[in-house]
Image (spheres, coloured by chain):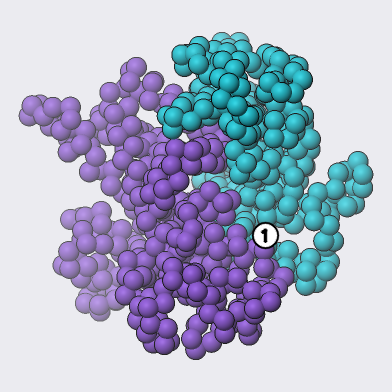
Chain colours: A cyan, B purple
Amino acid sequence: MIRFIVSRLIGMVLVLIVVSLVTFLIFQAVPLLAKSSPVYYYIGKAPATPELLKTLTHRFGFDQPLPAQYWSYLAGFFGKSITDGTSAPVQCDFPCFGYSFRRNELVSTLIVQALPVTISLCIGAAILWLVGGLLVGTLSGLKPGSFTDRAGMTGALAAVSLPIFFTGPVLLLVFVYTLGWLPDNGGYVDITVNPAQWFLSLLLPWVCLAFLFAALYARLTRSNVLETMGEDYIRTARAKGLDRRTIVVKHGLRAALTPIVTIFGIDIGSLIGTTIITEQVFNLRGLGTLSIQAISSLDLPVMLGVTVVAAFALVVANFIVDLLYAVIDPRVTV
Amino acid sequence: MSLSGPTEFEAVAADDGLSGSGLQGDGEPSPDATSSDIAGRSLWAIAWSHLKRDKLALAGGVVIVLFILLAVFADPIATAYANITGRAGDTYATAHNTPPNDVLDTLTGLPVGDFSGVSGKYWLGVIPLSGQDMLTNLLYGARTSLVIAGLATVLSLVLGVLAGVISGFYRGWVDTVLSRIMDVLLSFPTLLFSLALVSVSGIISTSSFLRYAVIVFVLGFFAFPYIGRIVRGQVLSLREKEFVEAARSLGAGNARIMFREIAPNLVGPILVYATLSIPNNILGEAGLSFLGVGVIPPTPSWGQMLSDAGGYIQVDPFYIFLPGLAIFITVLAFNLFGDGLRDALDPKAGGR
């Protein structure tokens, strides 16, 4: 078990190193390719004078060879002092994602502000899609070819073909603008401010996001259930005279749902990087919106910070899933 | 499916009891034909016989063909449409420069009339503010979707098959390295990286060709590990088969065995993957366009139209449904056909 954990941890560090290398290449090497200084995108504007550009290029280390730049970029995560040469230096402690001169804010502060929105969105949607997807998938898988099965699977196929940026505005049109059942509050209300408002403000985003995933889970659950229910041990259980409920719940679902655990963990981890569109549609100021704003204003420190956080979430989720899987399925351990 | 000849078609039709020729004496059509009937049929003939009974998949196939035809012949269709409606020479690009005054409200920029200004002149109405014809834009949007999704799928196929065949065939450290790379890529926050790459590429050049290329790259490159893994698994088992041994004993080299002996066996899974990957890439392109990092206007894109329509949802609600339905129908068609194809090519999925 310890060997397993260690090897997974090494893999995790490897992924993070690659992610950091790629982000570094994208954000620092590509501007060099274009013969344009990364300084512009770091301080969010053209430096006032050519001398200042020179000073900043030197201070940020952009005049050093690329490997040295990468090293100081890595070291920067553990804290540094940042200034654009005109303002007072800002101390940035570990985990340091840099400072956004466009917003005059530490990137970590911006991320911490945006995180509750994205996490609320992710958790609510995950509960919805897990319940919905498993229910539809199980019912379909138990009675293949039935009306429930056909309706469920056709619905699931339709659901994966509907982009959120179509369903989202249409749901808004129907439930907010036409029927007026949901408030038009233009975005997220924090749970600590008003739990009811929080719930209502997130209801449509949850449904939209969950719809997409529920469809995938329903299809997956169906095929797993179908396969498991055909196994010999299910026949044995049936031959023993166990009632259907026990067979399905205790013997069938347990085995059928194990692979779902894996996928669920990975999806939750990757969700932080995929809620961008949902946040954009429903005007939620989470990590996704933060990254889109950073992109449109070429605010590279923010873009970089969000990317690293998203990669970290994904890697941690993968790690937890691997551990969980080893616990659930003893065959996995070495 | 051009791979199966007409004679096979007839044989299959006979099996299904559709042609009425009495292979089965009692005339009872049976999906599980006796083994002697099946013997001698190619995989494609069997697949076709399954697919033919899958009405949804066939409907999907028809829509796909229609979509491809519309995208390929967008120019002549748009010209003919403009001529019929008395707006000769009016393309999406020129309409952008001169919004016709009679179709837009001069104060609000909204289309005049119901349903985004549907009329004999503009069959599906016009786009607010620009006054461009909706139908023409949808038509060229199909082309954008098809070109980008198609090229991205080709890219992921080439990379994925290469990586999968090589790592499955050589195993050992080559496999370890390639599989690790694929694993790492799978745990990338893909959308964020795509956004970053597309936006940073704008620093180098704002040419729409580069933008096209970068979009194709991010969609294709981040997807290749999926097909790579499937192919690797298949190759791992195929390489142990007798025909590989036979080829080797005849003196065939590694390259020949990999790409002439093993690879043709992968056509089934690759075809299924390709059919299911195109809708993903269509959604991907639309998503990037929706987020403002897709193809550069005035090139029409369904995602861009949806993004634009979101802003008019209260005043011109009809707008959003057209590009939305276009995406939905196209993607659904590919998904239906891909699903049907997978079931048809999967020997385990009999009895449907």
Q: Chain of mark 1?
A: A
Q: Nearer the viewer, residue A251 or B56?
A: B56
Query: In the rendered view, would you say A233 is above or below B123?
Result: above
Residue type at numbered disc 1: Gly
Residue B334 image-quadrant placement: bottom left
Nearer-the-camera pick, A104 or B25: A104
The secondary structure type at the circle numbered 1 is: helix
Tell me if A44 is positioned left or right of B298 in this view: right
Within 10 Å of disc 1 (Cα), the crowding (few <14, some 14-19, many 20+) is: many
Q: Is residue A59 visible?
A: yes
Q: Residue at x 86, y 44 (%)?
A: A190
**In this figure, what is the number of numbered marks?**
1
Question: Could you tell me residue B246's position as x and y percent?
Answer: 13, 31
Q: Position of residue B346 (x, y in %)?
A: 37, 51
A330 shown above or below A116: above
Expressed as whole percent of the image width and height from the top left, the position of residue B317 reads 66, 73
Going 30% across and 64% down the picture, which residue do you hit?
B49
Point out the residue furthest to the left here: B250
Give the farthest residue toward the right: A193
**Left-right relation of A83 to A38:** right
- Quarter of the image with the N terminus of chain B is bottom left
Where A295 falls versus A208 (above or below)?
above
Q: Residue at 69% x, 30% y: name it.
A: A100
Residue B289: give x, y in percent of width and height. Answer: 53, 53
Residue A191 in which image quadrant: top right
State which quarter of the image contains the C terminus of chain B: bottom left
The residue that label 1 is drawn on is A168
Of residues B194 and B129, the one nearer the viewer is: B129
Q: Residue at x 51, y 22 (%)?
A: A21
Side (left or right) of B290 relative to A174: left
**Up/down of A257 relative to A3, above or below:** below
